[in-house]
Image (cartoon, rainbow, N blue to C red):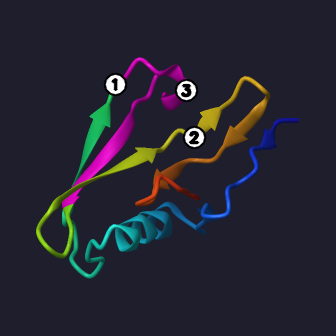
């Protein structure tokens, strides 16, 4: 049976996709009180480990922080399967590239 990779000290697991996104927003100083203040951009890259089982793309969240600066947040919505047989759940990347899984 596949085993989840060991999390780093700064990684967290949120109870839902929405909770993970909101945590990623907080870590990047993005207001969570404003509805729909972001856009999702599909990423069709060459890295097969970022794609879903049927080639589904990962995505980037584009938004602005509290100072109006543009921010991009990686969303690996398909998780990862690693060569050593471990996996990582779907996740957002925090400000320090930590995983906020769900």
Give the alpha-carbon distance from disc 1 to disc 3, as whole Å.
11 Å
**Is residue 37 at all visible to an observer of this figure?**
yes
Look at 76% across and 36% down and name the residue there: 86
Image quadrant of residue 41? top left
Q: Is residue 27 left or right of residue 69?
A: right
Viewer-proximal residue, 70 or 59? Answer: 70
Horizontal and vertical percent position of residue 31: 26, 77
The residue segment tinted magenta is 44-63
Q: Secondary structure at mark 3?
A: helix
Q: Earlier in the sequence, mark 1 or mark 3?
A: 1
Residue under circle 3?
49
Q: Residue furthest left?
A: 68
Give the alpha-carbon distance from disc 2 to disc 3, as whole Å.
8 Å
Q: Secondary structure at mark 1?
A: loop
Residue under circle 2?
79
Give the alpha-carbon distance from disc 1 to disc 2, as whole Å.
15 Å
Q: Is residue 60 above or below residue 14?
A: above
Q: Residue furthest right?
A: 1
Q: Are marks 1 and 2 in contact (CB under 8 Å)?
A: no
Look at 33% across and 67% down and name the residue there: 28
Q: Earlier in the sequence, mark 1 or mark 2?
A: 1
Horizontal and vertical percent position of residue 24: 41, 64
Horizontal and vertical percent position of residue 18: 44, 66
Label 1 neighbourhood size at 10 Å, few (<14), some (14-19), many (20+)? some
Residue under circle 1?
44
Horizontal and vertical percent position of residue 92: 46, 53
């Amino acid at each position: 049976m596949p085993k989840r990779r060991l999390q780093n000290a700064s990684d967290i697991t949120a109870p839902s996709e929405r909770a993970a996104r909101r945590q990623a927003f907080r870590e990047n100083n993005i207001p969570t009180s404003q509805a729909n203040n972001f856009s999702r951009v599909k990423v069709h890259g060459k890295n097969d480990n970022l794609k879903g089982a049927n080639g589904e793309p990962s995505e980037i969240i584009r938004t602005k922080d509290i100072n109006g600066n543009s921010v991009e947040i990686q969303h690996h919505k398909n998780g990862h399967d690693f060569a050593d047989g471990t996996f990582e759940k779907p996740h957002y990347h925090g400000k320090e590239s930590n995983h906020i899984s769900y």
